[in-house]
Amino acid sequence: MLRIAICDDQPNELAILNDYIAEYLDNHTLEAEVKKFSHPDTFLTTIESQSFHLYILDIVMPMVSGIELGKEIRRLDREAQIIYATTEPQFALQAYAASPINYLVKPINKAQLFDTLTLAISKADLAEEQTFAVKTADSLRVIKLSEIVCCEYSNHSVLFCLSKGEEVQSRTIRENFTVYTSLILRDRHFLQCHTSFVVNLRRVERFAKDSFTLCGGKMIPIAIKQYATVRDTYMDYLMARGRSND
């Protein structure tokens, strides 16, 4: 489950952020544990023993600044996502020492926060619950990686085929397909077997020299020049999966 921590010493601002996050989670049908901290000391004590996927921090707070909190988070966790939300724009450059995903200036723009949350969640390490943010023609869709059967590139957009038969079409993308799907390909379950196709190896029913057959019968081509690499990667995946099931 997604875990989110908010630290802000202003009660009203803390409440606004909490309400916005609750609305976002409801809109995207996501489950999350959200913890609020009104003092950085309590926050620091908590993160020594409890980790979060996403941190939303104010900058100017008593005793310990949000920048110092960010550095401490990075000492403990290199992968967590950090968002700064503050009334002070002048600290933006210093804040990047903690590698935040965004720096939002209050009053918080809800749409901007929602977009940042989508990006942060797509990058968060949630194991089987990892997600990918897809910008469609009329919305921003968050898809669980485990639900993706395959991705197909055509006419400068990407079609996501999902496990329940649904298809999600991205809007026009500017980068090439490999770059666009790079976050997905970091997951060991996914493999690019062709210039225009990425497959979820968990959904493969049959492997042949020229194609994968996926659950439901969909066939995905394997590029001739990539066959040896695809074969070796798939065999390594099957061996690793077999070891994990021992």
Image: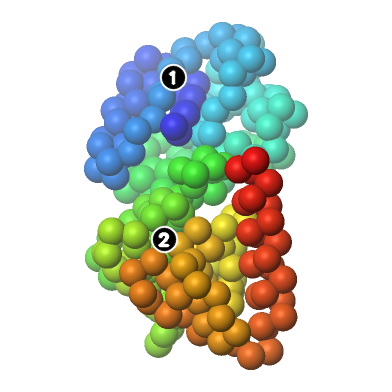
**Of callouts 2 and 1, the N-terminal one:** 1
- Residue 48 spot, x, y in % from top left: 66, 15
Asked whether 46 or 217 is in front, the reply is 217
- Residue 216 spot, x, y in % from top left: 33, 69
Looking at the image, residue 96 lies above or below residue 208: above
Give the position of the N terminus as an image quadrant. top left
**Residue at the front extreme, as displayed:** 246
Give the secondary structure at mark 2: strand
Q: Tell me if 118 is positioned left or right of 196 in this view.
A: left
Q: How many marks?
A: 2
Q: Tell me if 189 is positioned left or right of 35 in this view.
A: right
Residue at image location 36% in from the left, 45% down from the top: 114
For label 2, the residue is: 148
Residue at image location 52% in from the left, 34% down from the top: 54
Asked whether 52 or 163 is in front, the reply is 163
Q: Quadrant of residue 113?
A: top left
- Residue 155 spot, x, y in % from top left: 40, 87
For label 1, the residue is: 35
Give the position of the C terminus as an image quadrant. top right
Q: Tell me if 74 is positioned left or right of 7 in this view.
A: right
Q: Judge depth for marks 2 and 1 and give the one in front.
A: 2
Looking at the image, residue 104 lies above or below residue 43: below
Give the secondary structure at mark 1: strand
Asked whether 71 or 199 is in front, the reply is 199
- Residue 215 spot, x, y in % from top left: 39, 66
Looking at the image, residue 48 lies above or below residue 111: above
Q: Amino acid at mark 2?
A: Ile
Asked whether 23 or 157 is in front, the reply is 157
Residue at image location 45% in from the left, 75% down from the top: 213
Q: Tell me if 48 is positioned left or right of 133 in this view.
A: right
Q: Residues within 10 Å of mark 1 (few under 14, many from 20)?
A: some
